[in-house]
Amino acid sequence: MLAQFSEPTVTSMSEDSAPYTPPKVWTWDKESGGRFANINRPVAGATHDKELPAGEHALQLHSLATPNGIKVTVLLEELLELGIEDAEYDAYLVNIGEGDQFASGFVAINPNSKIPALSDRSTTPPTRVFESGAILLYLAEKFGAFIPQDPSARAECLSWLFWQMGSAPYLGGGFGHFYAYAPEKIEYCINRYAMEVKRQLDVLNQHLAERRFLCGDNYTIADIANYAWYGAVVLHNIYEAAEFLEVSSYTNVVRWAQEIEARPAVQRGRRVNKAWGPEEQRVPERHGPTDF
Ligand SMILES: N[C@@H](CCC(=O)N[C@@H](CS)C(=O)NCC(=O)O)C(=O)O
């Protein structure tokens, strides 16, 4: 049997905490601590009845300006920048700290209770889309933009899109959680996820050494998805880990992220559903271009 599949040995997490032995059956410790612990639950579904607000446009977005959220608002603003009027949208704020993601109306468009979630009322019945990667793909296909048509180029684009979707949980849920949010600093966990995040940054850095964008000369939904997370790492000190991860050493990632961030649509998209930071940057709800 390979070592990593053998029975776990019981070890203490830190010198002064008691050794932890997992019980036979896991039970929910509501007082587990850590930032965001109050919104984590081991069960799915709505906690309360509340309908979603609705605006006048076909596209109804319910989101928050986190890295996963801005992927969608950046793409929508890019589509509008191209002059695609049907990409007009209403964006409503989902306050995940207050449990809005567990309202019945939100759960109806995303049974996974996480932002972002989209409802497209141009179809009958309306089309719901959840998971940021699925929303990017749905919108890119619907409007025929920011995704290559050639099958090989399209495969490369989807590969980098799905790479991001698979990698981000290690960055946010793994590294970000244990480095910034966990109630105690656990060296083993921080080491494990710091190594993985640095490996991911190196994957991007090596790939971008010979390309302007992830798929070559054209900016696609793969860039939007990856910029949302790795741009936050290399440009915005997410988790206050820029120095710890030595992000400035990933020079190709920095150059690529800076170019994307300078785009007017990206500047707007980052502000939509933002409910923190400088007042003049916030656009908690967006219903039209005059909201900026
Ligand atoms: N894989 C999902 C992840 C979405 C996600 O984790 N959203 C977070 C904010 S960035 C959220 O809504 N968290 C609320 C919760 O976990 O209750 C996606 O890419 O759409």
Image (tube, rainbow, N blue to C red):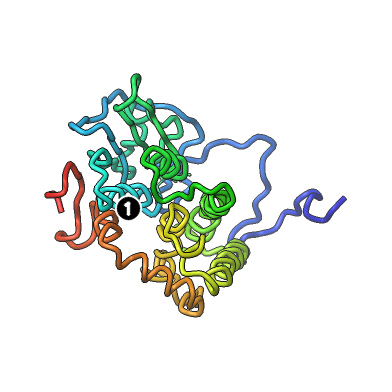
79 above or below 49?
below
- Which residue does the image show at 33% across and 38% down from the upper left? 99
> Residue 188 is drawn in which quadrant?
bottom right
Q: Which residue lies furthest to the top in this view?
A: 125
Can residue 187 be seen here? The reply is: no
2 above or below 239?
above
Q: Quadrant of ligand 1?
A: top left
Give amino acid for label 1: Val
Where's residue 192, x and y in %?
Answer: 62, 63
Q: Which residue lies furthest to the right in this view?
A: 1
Residue 200 or residue 159, whichever sits in front: 159
Residue marked by disc 1: 74
Residue 14 or residue 63, whichever sits in front: 63
- Which residue does the image show at 28% across and 54% down from the upper left? 269
Can residue 26 be seen here? The reply is: yes
Circle count: 1
Q: Which quadrant would the C terminus be assigned to in this image?
A: bottom left
- Which residue does the image show at 33% across and 65% down from the upper left? 261
